């Protein structure tokens, strides 16, 4: 099999699983441009290395490229199209040093006010009410932006006060309860933006012309709103606060509120993970580390390198959480 055909077949297979896989596809096509349309069983390691070791390639970028190529070659190895992986030994995975931004409630209010100002512009694709409702939805549910923009009107059950989210990565759906404040906000938005009964399967969050909001458009709009609100990082981090950080803020604010009210964390940590579509211990621990500093010393003692074990597998962590 030739490389070009193998790449296109593989990309289609990934897309059929509901995975856009844009960056991975770019890496494979870069390989094709470099080596040409060779039979895939004749590709050599020395031909792949220049794709990985491009100029000014950061460690994280190298690792992401390597992972995409490894998945591709493994796919065809299992199907007996190749008998070895034409890849160099993997480098050590780069340390994850990125720290999500957690918005204060004051900053959230400033973002909502700024939305009303920036989105008055007639050239804006998203009106002020829609973007404000979208921000409150993300903060009130901890949903990912991709889940929010894919939400359809039929996914919001006002009678049962439930919403159904389809995961961006796994495509697995989960049903979440709607709190009373968010319920009122979504109901008001639905009544003002969805006038026709025939729009039941339309996107819930609409642009001014009635189409689905694109993630790129939402992120660009948020950057403009954030600057207007004067919300910025001052900790020397490379990245400024993002729209996705509303998800982290949701989790940290919930945990902080539970700490203050002495809620049984042994029960609530798993519930929060399930609510957010996460099931491993590492995800819950990441949010615990962003809560007030008095919990961090205890958590450090309970943090050996354990990969992605599930929260319920760690008796010491559960004992600690029960004692909070």
Image: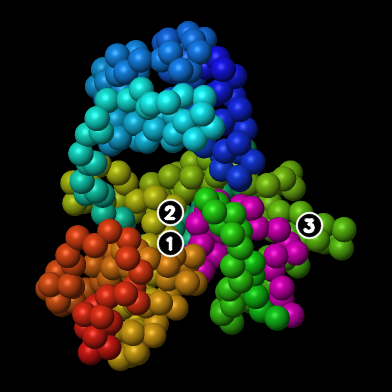
Judging by the rendered image, the residue that carries numbered circle 1 is 247
77 is higher (above) or lower (below) than 289: above
- N-terminal label among 1 and 3: 3
> Which tag, 3 or 2, sits closer to the chain's start?
3
Q: Nearer the viewer, residue 122 or 222?
A: 222
Name the residue at 55% across, 65% down: 137
Measured in 3D between alpha carbons, the distance from the residue under mark 1 to the one under mark 3, in whole angstroms, is 26 Å
Report the front residue among 101 and 195.
101
Rendered image quadrant of residue 175: bottom right
Indicate the quadrant where residue 211 lies.
top right
> Is residue 138 on the magenta stretch?
yes
What label sits on residue 201 in the rendered view? Answer: 3
- Which stretch is magenta? 132-159
Is residue 296 at all visible to an observer of this figure? no
| 273 drawn magenta | no
Q: Residue at x 32, y 25 (%)?
A: 87
Pointer 2 residue:
244
By secondary structure, the bulk of the magenta-drawn segment is best described as helix
Q: Nearer the viewer, residue 62 or 210?
A: 62
Circle 2: element type: loop
Where is residue 296 drawn, in percent x and y?
A: 16, 72
**Which quarter of the figure is the C terminus placed in?**
bottom left
Q: Position of residue 2 (x, y in %)?
A: 55, 14
Decide which of 87, 34 is in the foreground and name it: 87
Residue 200 can be seen in this image? yes
């Amino acid at each position: 099999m030739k490389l070009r055909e193998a790449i296109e077949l593989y990309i289609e297979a990934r897309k059929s699983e509901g995975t856009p896989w844009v960056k991975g596809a770019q890496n494979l096509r870069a390989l094709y441009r470099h080596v040409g349309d060779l039979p895939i069983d004749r590709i050599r390691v020395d031909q792949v290395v220049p794709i990985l070791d491009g100029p000014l390639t950061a460690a994280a970028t190298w690792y992401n490229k390597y992972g995409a190529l490894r998945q591709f070659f493994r796919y065809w190895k299992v199907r007996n199209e190749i008998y070895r992986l034409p890849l160099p030994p993997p480098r050590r995975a780069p340390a994850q040093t990125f720290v999500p931004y957690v918005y204060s409630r004051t900053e959230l209010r400033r973002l909502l006010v700024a939305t009303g100002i920036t989105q008055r512009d007639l050239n804006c694709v998203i009106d002020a009410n829609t973007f404000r409702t979208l921000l409150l939805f993300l903060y009130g549910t901890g949903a990912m932006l991709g889940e929010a923009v894919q939400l359809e009107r039929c996914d919001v059950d006002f009678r049962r006060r439930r919403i159904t989210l389809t995961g961006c990565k796994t495509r697995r759906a989960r049903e979440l309860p709607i709190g009373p404040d968010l319920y009122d906000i979504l109901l008001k938005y639905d009544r003002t933006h969805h006038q026709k009964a025939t729009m039941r399967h339309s996107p819930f969050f609409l642009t001014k012309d009635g189409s689905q909001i694109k993630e790129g458009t939402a992120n660009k709009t948020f950057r403009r709103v954030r600057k207007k609100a004067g919300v910025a990082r001052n900790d020397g981090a490379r990245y400024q606060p993002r729209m996705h950080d509303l998800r982290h803020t949701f989790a940290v604010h919930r945990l902080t509120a539970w700490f203050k009210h002495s809620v049984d964390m042994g029960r609530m940590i798993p519930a929060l993970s399930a609510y957010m579509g996460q099931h491993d211990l590492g995800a819950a621990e990441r949010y615990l580390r962003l809560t007030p500093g008095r919990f961090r010393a205890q958590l450090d003692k309970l943090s050996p390198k354990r990969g992605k074990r599930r929260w319920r597998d760690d008796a010491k962590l559960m004992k600690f959480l029960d004692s909070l």
